[in-house]
Image (cartoon, rainbow, N blue to C red):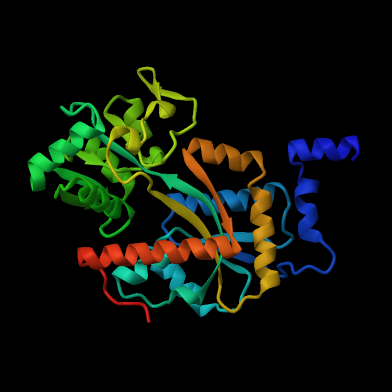
């Protein structure tokens, strides 16, 4: 290996990053590419897609241009319905979360899961149990005790109903025996503002959604729903940082793990070579400094899954959530 190649490997130069995409005879996009975002502008999924777009542009990974279009109607189902209408077109790449396979279980939508082809899971949002700074409970165990004691008078806020925050609230209820009032808001940002103002008792926001209020001393994190503590070294408020937040297991509450994957899809009827191209391109993007900085700045976890591993993950997660939704009276239809 030459000295130049070693430097390229260490620095992630555009030439090295781009080389595999230009392999002789491999399928490549031949016309402009559209990144279809299953969310509105500014949200986590939008930021995810636009980061991938910016890395592609900065490192010249594609010859055709890449545009981003937001199709966030129906809690993101607009993007997945659009994916169904462009079957066979590998120039349409859909960015979503686990909502791709969860939404058909809780609402009637215009697509089926097999209308899309999974390409990769690239990252996972962490979830933290937060309370406001003046709350009387000092840890997650005390908060759960208050949930059980106060029942419906305890208000847990989150983004939308029958979505990730609501699911996590139901799992906490199941583990503790509590039954609280879930208050849905339009976004995690709105839930953060409501918690900081003391209008709700707790929320389960991801780190990026609540960090500004924590920095200002308006909210406190109680535990993270991950088997391992977050590894970010930053101290956020009063000498306390992400790595100081105990895990749910350490805090003595459940569930032990709850994360939301960030996923990338192609329309159905695309082929293996086309899927392989996008898998390889996304793999190279993960090696860049921009990607690593994004993971850290948003306190996201790395969750790289492709192929059979990803398909198995989706199958297991869909089955587990289907059982939960049936128990909670959310299930609108059995897949068939």
Give residue 3's position: percent from left, percent from top: 89, 34
Left or right, residue 214 beside residue 289: left
Q: Residue at x 68, y 56 (%)?
A: 281
Give residue 141's position: percent from left, percent from top: 22, 33
Left or right, residue 18 beside residue 152: right
Q: Residue at x 51, y 58 (%)?
A: 263
Quick one: 85 or 311, which is closer to the camera?
311
Left or right, residue 297 beside residue 247: right
Give residue 160's position: percent from left, percent from top: 28, 56
> Which part of the image, by quadrant, shows the C terminus?
bottom left
Q: Residue at x 37, y 43 (%)?
A: 127
On the image, which quarter does residue 13 sit in?
top right
On the image, which quarter does residue 278 sit in?
bottom right
Instruction: Count every numbered label the image shows and give the total.
Output: 0
Residue 73 in view, yes or no: no
Given the current orientation, which residue lies at the most extreme bottom position?
A: 336
Give residue 313's position: percent from left, percent from top: 48, 60
Given the current orientation, which residue lies at the most extreme top position?
A: 239
> Which part of the image, by quadrant, shows the N terminus?
top right
Given the current orientation, which residue lies at the most extreme right position?
A: 2
Relative to 321, residue 251 above or below: above
Residue 253 in view, yes or no: yes
Relative to 299, residue 63 above or below: below
Q: Residue at x 68, y 70 (%)?
A: 274
Quick one: 38 or 241, which is closer to the camera?
241
């Amino acid at each position: 290996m030459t000295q130049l190649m070693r430097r390229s490997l260490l620095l992630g130069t555009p030439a090295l990053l781009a080389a595999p995409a230009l392999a002789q005879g491999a399928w490549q996009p031949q016309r402009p590419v559209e990144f279809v975002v299953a969310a509105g502008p500014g949200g986590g999924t939008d930021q995810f897609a636009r980061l991938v777009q910016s890395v592609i542009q900065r490192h010249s990974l594609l010859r055709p241009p890449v545009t981003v279009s937001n199709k966030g109607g129906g809690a993101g189902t607009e993007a997945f319905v659009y994916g169904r209408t462009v079957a066979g077109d590998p120039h349409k790449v859909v960015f979503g979360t686990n909502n791709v396979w969860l939404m058909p279980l809780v609402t009637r939508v215009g697509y089926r899961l097999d209308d899309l082809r999974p390409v990769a899971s690239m990252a996972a949002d962490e979830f933290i149990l937060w309370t406001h700074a003046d709350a009387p409970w000092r840890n997650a165990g005390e908060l759960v005790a208050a949930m059980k004691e106060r029942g419906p008078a305890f208000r847990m806020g989150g983004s939308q109903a029958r979505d990730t925050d609501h699911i996590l609230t139901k799992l906490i209820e199941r583990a503790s025996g509590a039954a609280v009032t879930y208050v849905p808001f339009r976004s995690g940002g709105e839930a953060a503002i409501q918690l900081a103002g003391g209008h709700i008792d707790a929320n389960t926001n991801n780190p990026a959604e609540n960090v500004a209020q924590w920095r200002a001393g308006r909210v406190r994190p109680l535990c993270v729903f991950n088997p391992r503590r977050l590894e970010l070294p930053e101290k956020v408020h009063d000498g306390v940082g992400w790595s100081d937040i105990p895990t749910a297991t350490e805090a003595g509450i459940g569930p032990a793990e709850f994360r939301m994957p960030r996923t990338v899809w192609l329309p159905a009827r695309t082929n293996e070579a086309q899927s392989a191209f996008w898998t390889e391109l996304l793999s190279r993007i993960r090696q860049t400094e921009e990607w690593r900085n994004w993971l850290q700045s948003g306190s996201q976890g790395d969750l790289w899954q492709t192929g059979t591993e990803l398909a198995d993950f989706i199958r297991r997660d869909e089955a587990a959530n289907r059982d939960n939704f049936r128990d909670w009276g959310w299930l609108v239809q059995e897949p068939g």
